[in-house]
Amino acid sequence: MPPPPIEIATSLTLDDRVAASAFAYRDLMVRARRRVLIVLAVLCFLTLLGALSSAWGEGGKRDSALLLRLFLQSLAGPTGIGIAGFTAILLTYYLLYPFHARSSLRRWFIDEGQDAPMPVSHRFDATGLASSAPHHQSHLACHRAGSLTDGPEHLFLSPVGVEDVVALPKRDIPAEQQGRLHDWIAYCGTAEGRDATAGNGTIEASPASAELSIRFSQNLEDRVAGLNGQMDRPGMRRRRRRGFILAMLGAVLVAPALMLFVWSIDSNRVPWQFALPLFGEMFLTQFWKPALGLCALVLAIAAAHPWFRRQHARALGKMLQESKATYETEVRFSESGMETRQDGLVNRWDWAAFSGVETKGEHIFLHLRREEPMLLPRRALDSGQMTVFDRLARDHIRPEPEART
């Protein structure tokens, strides 16, 4: 028996967006943390292997007791201090990574101007989920509902074949309704729920007929282009520039800072009024050499960074392409806005929802004011359709200033 309708009105805040993204990309975060432990294990193994090799070369190959004693002595000295040092650093990063990831997501939404509260209403019924936000309506059929996960402060709906999740803040959902939502997702998993269609007038017919209609299925290159586009957003570029400047500054100052630290902990250090001229002389004669080498390393990394970003985007895109179901998408453009249709999923945006159009290579990015950009592959449009699209975009999309820092 179909469950009774459930209506929820809420306001999505920056914290809700961060929580939704953190939940959607939780598997990636787990893999990133696991890589930290792998790096730590490799560093410990190589360091211990080096210490053992050194003890072997110092005479341990003839006496196993001497080998063990020399090995333990190295662990009690600089080798052990080095292991303890990078272990402490990497384990600290491992423990703080969830907070770092959430902070990065928060900065991303702020950079994209998506930090303002957004009113959203949801209706869960026998046909699926109908949602409404400013200039955006959508309907998700039951057979695409996927799963509902209970989090500390949110319920997360993970639709089938969709990368994003629907975050439902518990602060706006009574306990009784939360239980009914679990009943609704259970109904959607039944044969009756799966047979429910996405139609039934949930989204009213567009008042304007479609002037342009295209179809495409998202492939690996489309996903890679979308990820590259995210990495090349203005906020990300500004952050990379800041990181480069700080890295160059650190490369210049690391040698003097290390020498100053050694001087400060030396019990027999000379007074600062005598040490300062020596520091100046060492900077001119000695410190510039490691500084030059480190600056060259920073420049080499900066030059190679675009290649690393492309490789990262391709690896991530391949993983998403293999883990997510692919549906053919129909996109309709009219005088009233844009509509996308898949099997069991409909989205409609008014033109006021868009903030700009950008063409990168073989893809067109339609930037939304409150959501992630929409991507259209140029292969889906012939020359005539491209002319119609350009006219509609020129007539209806009003660009806004670059996103904030």
Image (cartoon, rainbow, N blue to C red):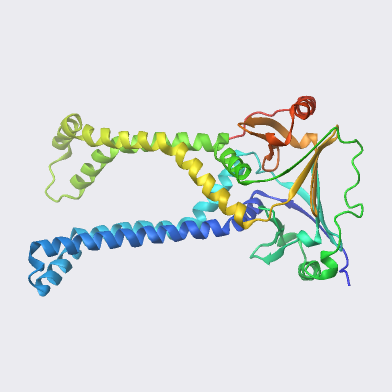
Q: Which residue is located at x 33 percent, y 38 percent?
A: 250
Give the residue at the far bottom of this rendering: 65
Q: Left or right of 177: which side holds 60?
A: left
Q: Left or right of 272: which side holds 351?
A: right
Give the image location of residue 84, x and y in percent: 28, 61
Give the image location of residue 198, x and y in percent: 85, 55
Q: Quadrant of the N terminus?
A: bottom right
Q: Which residue is located at x 11 percent, y 74 percent?
A: 65
Q: Which residue is located at x 26 percent, y 32 percent?
A: 292
Give the image location of residue 113, x and y in percent: 64, 39
Tell me the quarter of the picture where residue 116 sits: top right
Tell me the quarter of the picture where residue 172 sits: bottom right
Relative to the observer, which residue lies in front, 274 or 312?
312
Q: Left or right of 188: which side holds 249?
A: left
The answer to whether residue 107 is above or below residue 75 is above
Count the marks: how many?
0
Q: Quadrant of the C terminus?
A: top right
Give the image location of residue 50, x and y in percent: 21, 59
The answer to whether residue 335 is above or below residue 42 is above
Q: Which residue is located at x 15 percent, y 37 percent?
A: 275
Relative to the observer, which residue lies in front, 262 or 285?
285
